[in-house]
Image: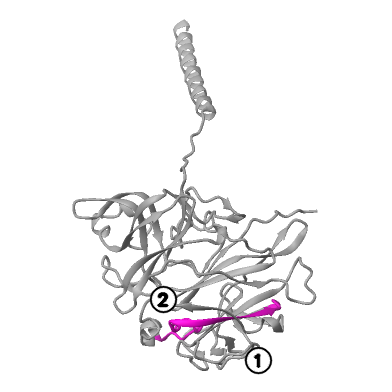
Amino acid sequence: MKKEVNVIGVLLMRTSGLICCLLGSWLLHSCQKIEYTEMKSPAYLRVFNSLNVPDIQESVGQDSLAYLCMLINPVLDAEGNPVSAEIVGDFLKQREIYAPPYPVHIGVSTSVDNPEYPGKENVLVGPVLNGFDLSSWAQVPAGKLTFLFMFRPKNSTPFFELPAALRKSKAVAGDFELMAGEVYTLQALYAEFNSRRRTLLLRQENFHQQSFSDSLAYVNFYNYSAEGYQEAPANLKLPNGKIKRHLFEGGIKDTMDVYLTLMKGQDFLPFQKGIVLRNGELASTSHAGQYLYTVKRNVRSASPAPYVSFPIWVKDNDNGVYTDIWQRFFFISPNLQVTAGNHPFYEYGQLIGDYWHIGGPFVDPQGQFAMLNCLLNGPIIYTGRDRYEYHMGENLPNMIVNVHSGTDNPKSFPTANTVEIINGQAYLMTMQRKYAPPIYK
């Protein structure tokens, strides 16, 4: 009996000693200082995969939209293939038509697909500069950087875990000098449509250096379409008999004048794959068909375009807190005479039911005319006059954001915006100043 008691005592002592050891280890770990990664004097970078028409990928040998991995300062083997990189931005799918002012992709998707960099990546991001939130821009080292974009198969395997044979297909590469504290947007683009020749364009942004008014919204415009896209046959741009849903899809001319009409009214009813807008009308006759800017196709120059502005308070009953105005932009060939509120094209088309292959514009302007409605992000705007008639503008979010701020719900705030026309698509990137958080009573 005494021997059994001794054995049990030894076991208890060992068990308690193990528990004490584990507890002490946990306490030591929980109390130790955590070292956070810090980057001194970084530049700030946002990256888009704007290769938005089918390309022939060397790795798969078939037509497909480019799916990329971005490597910054890659290390190459003797055959010139990457084996590692200082920074990796993987799973870059084609960019989305709207790039919001804050990262919305983190924690809301189970897919590895990333519509931009940093996007879903858990990396150090930019601060607030001159009131603008730069959390959609990643911190990267300043200085000369080498960028290499690789084609990769569309799956969930990280790039450097893919078989070696699938890590050899280069999409595009380039070297750039980034300055500390500056803000950059990098895009992979097609420079020429027929050959699918690719290029990189690094634009140094300056929105955070501007003295913007709190009562004006700002926007600049770029046409980064590939040479020859607008002139190419429709079957190469709209495969499988797809109709034009909006007039940008066929491309626009290399030089286009941009006009703005401010609209009011956002009361709508859902209808099929879109809406019927019940109260859309002119907000002000002084802001109907207002000339803003002439945009020229250019994939060589990365110089920032100037910002133009429009007021957010234009209605007689505006109270300085909330407005329901939205924007309709017209892109019109400069050789056409335009007066305020008038242009020589028909704005509407017909879409039969839920099908995407029946209908299209009543009159095809052949690249001389296109429209952009900044009202909702995507839904088709039906007229209500005929159940199948709809507006041929591309539909993107409002450049005036309405949110709960302070005691006001909603409160209207202007933003700074960039509109990019790339081949058959208009894209919107919005930058926004920080605003007061909501106060709940």
Magenta-tinted stretch: 241-268
Q: For residue 251: magenta?
A: yes
Q: Nearer the viewer, residue 282 or 307?
A: 307
The residue depicted at 27 percent of the width and 59 percent of the height is: 166
The x and y percentages for residue 35 are 48, 34
| Number of numbered discs visible in the structure rendering | 2
| Quadrant in the rendering for residue 190 | bottom left
Is residue 71 shown above or below 59?
A: above
Vertically, is 318 above or below 129? below
Structural distance between the alpha carbons of marks 1 and 2:
35 Å
The residue at the far left in this view is 78
Residue 265: give x, y in percent of width and height. Answer: 71, 78
Picture colour scheme: one colour
319 vs 42: above or below: below
**Which amino acid type is shown beneath numbered disc 1?**
Arg
Instruction: Report the disc number at residue 172.
Output: none
Residue at the spot x=48%, y=91% of the render?
Answer: 364
| Residue hosting label 2 | 225
Question: Dot 1 corresponds to which residue?
Answer: 385
At numbered mark 2, what does the secondary structure look like: helix, strand or loop?
loop
Q: Residue furthest top?
A: 2
Q: Nearer the viewer, residue 21 or 54?
A: 54
Give SS at disc 1: loop
Q: Amino acid at mark 2?
A: Ser
